[in-house]
Image (spheres, rainbow, N blue to C red):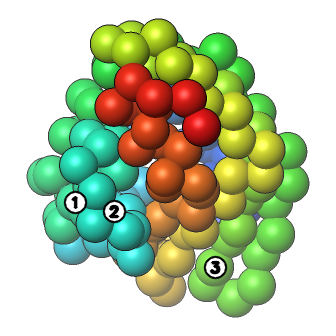
Amino acid sequence: MVVMGNITTVQQIYTAFSRGDIPAILEYLSDSVVWEYGISDTDVPWLQLQNGKANVPRFFESLEQFELHKFEPKVFLENGNIVVALIDVELTVKATGVKVIEEDETHIWHFNMQGQVIKYGHRLDTHRHWLAYKGENS
C-alpha cells in the first residue's frame, strides 16, 4: 500500500464504501484495529465494538439491516495522526421502518506511522439508533 495523507486515506475509504468494496476498506486497516472504540454498550448491531481487522466485516454485514438514503462526508479535519470527518447520514431500519437522520455525525480515525487505521469510532446519537432498531420514533 502506498502511504498517503490521512485525509486522502479516509476519503478513499469512503469511496470504497460507496461502491460496497469492503476488501478495499480492509486494506487500510492495521491487523489489530479497534473498530467502534468508545461506543456505549448497546444491542444495536451496527454499533458494536470489533477488535481486529478479521472482525470488522461484521460491522459491514450489520449495515444490511438498514437502507442508507444519504451518506455525505462534508468536512475533514486532520491533526497529527487523527482525522475527524463530519457526515450527514439518513437511513431507515428495514425491520421497523423507522428513519434516522444524523447531521454532522462524527467519525474519528486514528492512524499509525505507516498510514494504517488503528482505531475508528462513530460519535452519533446512539439512543436514536437504539429507538429506531427497537421500532420507536425519537
- The image quarter containing residue 6 is bottom right
Label 3 close to label 1 by CB (< 8 Å)? no
Residue at numbered disc 3: 82
Q: Quadrant of the N terminus?
A: bottom left
Residue drawn at 43 percent across, 20 percent down: 93
Q: Secondary structure beneath disc 1?
A: strand
Residue 66 image position (x, y, % from top left): 42, 19
Mark 2 or mark 3, which is nearer to you?
2
Q: Does 23 sit above or below residue 85? A: above
Measure the C-alpha gap from mark 2 to mark 3: 14 Å
Measure the C-alpha gap from mark 3 to mark 1: 19 Å
Residue drawn at 46 percent across, 82 percent down: 112
Q: Amino acid at mark 2?
A: Trp
Residue at numbered disc 1: 50
Is residue 9 or residue 69 the one in the foreground? Answer: 69
User: Residue 35, labelled with which disc?
Assistant: 2
Residue 56 image position (x, y, % from top left): 24, 49
